[in-house]
Image (cartoon, rainbow, N blue to C red):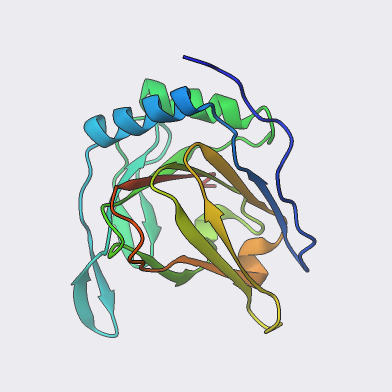
């Protein structure tokens, strides 16, 4: 496999109260294909139930939490028990350190089976993540549009396409001032896998 890693971001916009860096070709195509197949076949995917306005719904995607240092993690009203980190997850964790020196200790994986799977407006701002969380997000498989908007400045609203083998870093005060989502789409036919590395304090 070709192991060429991209160290300079393709896009690093000037955002009020936030820092975002996007590496579209962070992994070579061969390496991205390898990880996509590995995660699709080996991760213990499951569909969790969430409560919204008193009603329980099945999450519109599959997830899996992994960590070797946590007992549990709570987000969006869900408390998850982590699975162990795998060799491939540790490999990606080490690759992140080439562009971001941060001691991430867990990863939440999302499987978007088709365009009907989604993730609504939210911020990764749980108290367990600390004051200014850093999030490192890998994308594999089908491309999807990532939308993000400022909580108060209406004209600060963007969307970008997340590609196979890409890495998105959200840093600074982004989780405090900004919301993001992966909306439904009719474009996606193949699965998409997203990994969000984070540090739980």
**Is there any visible trace of residue 95 in the rendered image?**
yes
Name the spot of residue 156 as percent of width and height, x first: 70, 76
Q: Residue at point 64% right, 68% down? A: 176
User: Which of the pair 140/93 is nearer the observer?
Assistant: 140
Q: In the picture shown, does residue 86 fall above or below 151?
A: above
Name the spot of residue 9 as percent of width and height, x first: 71, 41
Q: In the picture shown, does residue 12 fall above or below 159?
A: above
In-image side of 81 versus 19 (left or right): left
Q: In the picture shown, does residue 168 fall above or below 74?
A: above
**Is there any visible trace of residue 126 in the rendered image?**
no
Number of residue marks: 0
Quarter of the figure with residue 131 = bottom right
In this view, the residue farthest toward the top is 1
User: Which of the pair 80/167 is nearer the observer?
Assistant: 167
In-image side of 171 versus 49 (left or right): right
Q: Residue at point 20% right, 49% down? A: 46
In-image side of 7 versus 24 (left or right): right
Q: Residue at point 58% right, 68% down? A: 148
Quarter of the figure with residue 96 = top right
Name the spot of residue 135 as percent of width and height, x first: 57, 49
User: Which of the pair 92/161 is nearer the observer?
Assistant: 161
Name the spot of residue 163 as percent of width and height, x first: 50, 46
């Amino acid at each position: 496999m070709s192991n060429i890693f991209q160290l300079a971001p393709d896009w690093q916009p000037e955002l009020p109260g936030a820092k975002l860096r996007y590496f579209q070709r962070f992994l070579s195509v061969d390496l991205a294909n390898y990880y996509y197949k590995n995660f699709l076949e080996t991760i213990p995917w499951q569909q969790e139930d969430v409560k919204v306005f008193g009603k329980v719904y099945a999450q519109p995607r599959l997830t899996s939490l992994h960590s070797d240092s946590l007992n549990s993690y709570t987000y969006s009203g869900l408390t998850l028990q982590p699975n162990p980190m795998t060799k491939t997850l540790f490999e990606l964790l080490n690759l992140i350190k080439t562009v971001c020196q941060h001691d991430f200790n867990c990863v939440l994986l999302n499987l978007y089976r088709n365009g009907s799977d989604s993730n609504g407006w939210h911020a990764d701002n749980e108290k367990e993540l600390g004051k200014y969380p850093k999030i490192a997000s890998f994308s594999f498989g089908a491309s999807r549009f990532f939308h993000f908007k400022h909580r108060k400045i209406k004209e600060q609203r963007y969307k970008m396409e997340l590609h196979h083998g890409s890495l998105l870093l959200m840093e600074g005060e982004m989780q405090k001032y900004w919301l993001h989502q992966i909306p439904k789409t009719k474009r996606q036919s193949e699965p998409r896998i997203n990994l969000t590395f984070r540090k739980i304090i």
